[in-house]
Image: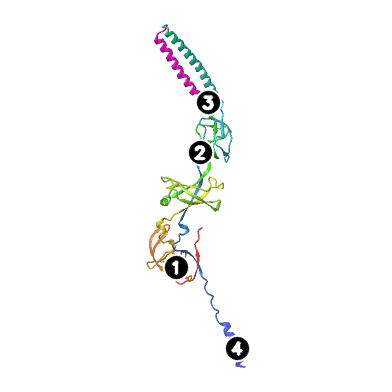
């Protein structure tokens, strides 16, 4: 056999049996952040309830039986609008009787005036004594006092007859009804609640550990759960002076400065405050998950310009719920890994994935 003919065949066979080249390892995705920028978790977001700033509970000033109700839950009302009526038959009779007493007392008072006038004429002619005249004058004063008394009682009876009509004290919308026609109610018992929707606010409970960061008048961002894509501006209007005895939190009311018709009482809203103080803003704070320890040294993983992970020894300061303060070894603006740092290898090629706010 010709050796020259076998040589190309052997070369082809040897090439076919050689091990193929291993593919290069793709970069590993790694969650990162820029040191010195406030992460999204440093913003305090609290969940609260939308409430009207002014909400009044109204009831009758007298007791009686409800015979008519003019509104339902959700009904818009104007100031002075009739809401409900009591049975006024007995009150009208009392008012009529009081007015009759007034007329009778007016007649007696007129008689006392005329009698005193005659007694003064007789006294001027020395027909009666001074004591007899004094008696008539005292009777007139008594009659005047009794007349004033029955007139006051008549006014009370007339007012009670008018109190059988319950009217709205302000413009607003009915948010609750606690009585129905036919029900007998007591004086001052709550019949209806009316909310003034011209001013709305969000009530949130702030933990006592964050109370130093909330100030009256500070701005806030409000988002409704029904409209998460729309943000409203708010301002802290009121801070409770003492904590709730059950939850140990402080009630804070945040006014919605640009409220619209989409905001309804009872809705759930998220209120975002800025937790970072001026002192914290000048410090370099990183998440706790970005710091690791090896051989007694604290390390962070810095992603260099070639997207390679490099361990960096740093000095750590105070720890807080916002993160850990880095006093040296790291500069603001450097990219660091903040997740999965225990599995990184020095010089490992990574694909940085920037942290975004939820």
For mark 3, what is the residue?
Answer: 158
For mark 4, what is the residue?
Answer: 8
Question: If you read the primary sequence from the N terminus, does the residue marked by circle 2 or circle 4 appear first?
Answer: 4
Question: If you read the primary sequence from the N terminus, does the residue marked by circle 1 or circle 2 appear first?
Answer: 2
Q: Which mark is residue 159?
A: none
**Label 4 secondary element:** helix
Q: Position of residue 349 (x, y in %)?
A: 49, 71
**Crowd around label 3: few <14 · some 14–19 · many ≥20 (10 Å):** some
Q: How far apart are labels 1 and 2 at the CA level?
A: 59 Å
**Nearer mark to the viewer, of 4 and 1:** 1
Question: If you read the primary sequence from the N terminus, does the residue marked by circle 2 or circle 3 appear first?
Answer: 2
**Nearer mark to the viewer, of 2 and 4:** 2
**Label 3 secondary element:** helix
Q: Quadrant of the N terminus?
A: bottom right
Closer to the camera, 288 or 2? 288
Q: How far apart are labels 2 and 3 at the CA level?
A: 26 Å
Q: Position of residue 260 (x, y in %)?
A: 55, 47
* Residue at x 62% of width, y 93% of height: 2
Which stretch appears magenta? Answer: 127-154
In screen coordinates, is 202 left or right of 3? left
For mark 1, what is the residue?
Answer: 302
**Crowd around label 1: few <14 · some 14–19 · many ≥20 (10 Å):** many
In screen coordinates, is 313 left or right of 233? left
* Up/down of 89 relative to 311, above or below: above
Q: Position of residue 175 (x, y in %)?
A: 54, 41
Q: Are marks 3 and 4 in contact (CB under 8 Å)?
A: no
Any part of residue 338 in sight: no
Q: Which mark is residue 56?
A: 2
């Amino acid at each position: 056999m010709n050796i020259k003919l076998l040589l190309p065949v052997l070369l082809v066979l040897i090439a076919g049996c050689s091990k193929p080249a291993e593919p290069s390892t793709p970069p590993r995705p790694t969650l990162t952040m820029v040191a010195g920028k406030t992460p999204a978790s440093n913003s305090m977001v609290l969940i609260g309830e939308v409430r009207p700033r002014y909400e009044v509970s109204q009831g009758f000033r007298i007791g009686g039986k409800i015979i008519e109700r003019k509104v339902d839950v959700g009904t818009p009302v104007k100031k002075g609008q009739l809401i409900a009526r009591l049975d006024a038959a007995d009150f009208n009779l009392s008012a009529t009787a009081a007015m009759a007493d007034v007329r009778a007392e007016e007649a007696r008072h007129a008689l006392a005036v005329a009698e005193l006038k005659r007694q003064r004429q007789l006294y001027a002619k020395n027909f009666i004594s001074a004591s007899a005249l004094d008696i008539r004058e005292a009777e007139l004063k008594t009659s005047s006092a009794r007349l004033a008394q029955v007139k006051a009682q008549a006014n009370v009876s007339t007012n009670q007859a008018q109190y059988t009509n319950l009217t709205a004290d302000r413009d607003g919308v009915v948010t609750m009804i606690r009585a129905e026609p036919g029900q007998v109610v007591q004086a001052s018992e709550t019949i209806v609640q009316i909310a003034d929707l011209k001013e709305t606010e969000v009530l949130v409970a702030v933990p006592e550990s964050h109370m130093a960061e909330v100030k009256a008048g500070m701005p806030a961002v409000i988002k409704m759960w029904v409209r998460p894509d729309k943000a409203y501006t708010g301002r802290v209007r009121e801070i409770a002076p003492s904590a709730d005895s059950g939850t140990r939190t402080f009630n804070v009311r945040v006014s919605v400065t640009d409220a619209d018709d989409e905001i309804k009482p009872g809705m759930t809203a998220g209120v975002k405050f800025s937790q970072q103080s001026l002192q914290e803003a000048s410090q370099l704070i990183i998440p706790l998950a970005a710091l690791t320890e090896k051989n007694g040294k604290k390390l962070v993983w810095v992603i260099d310009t070639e997207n390679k992970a490099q361990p960096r020894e740093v000095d750590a300061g105070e720890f807080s719920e916002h993160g850990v303060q880095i006093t040296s070894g790291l500069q603001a603006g450097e990219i660091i890994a903040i997740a999965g740092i225990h599995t990184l290898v020095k010089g490992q090629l990574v694909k940085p994935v920037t942290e975004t706010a939820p």
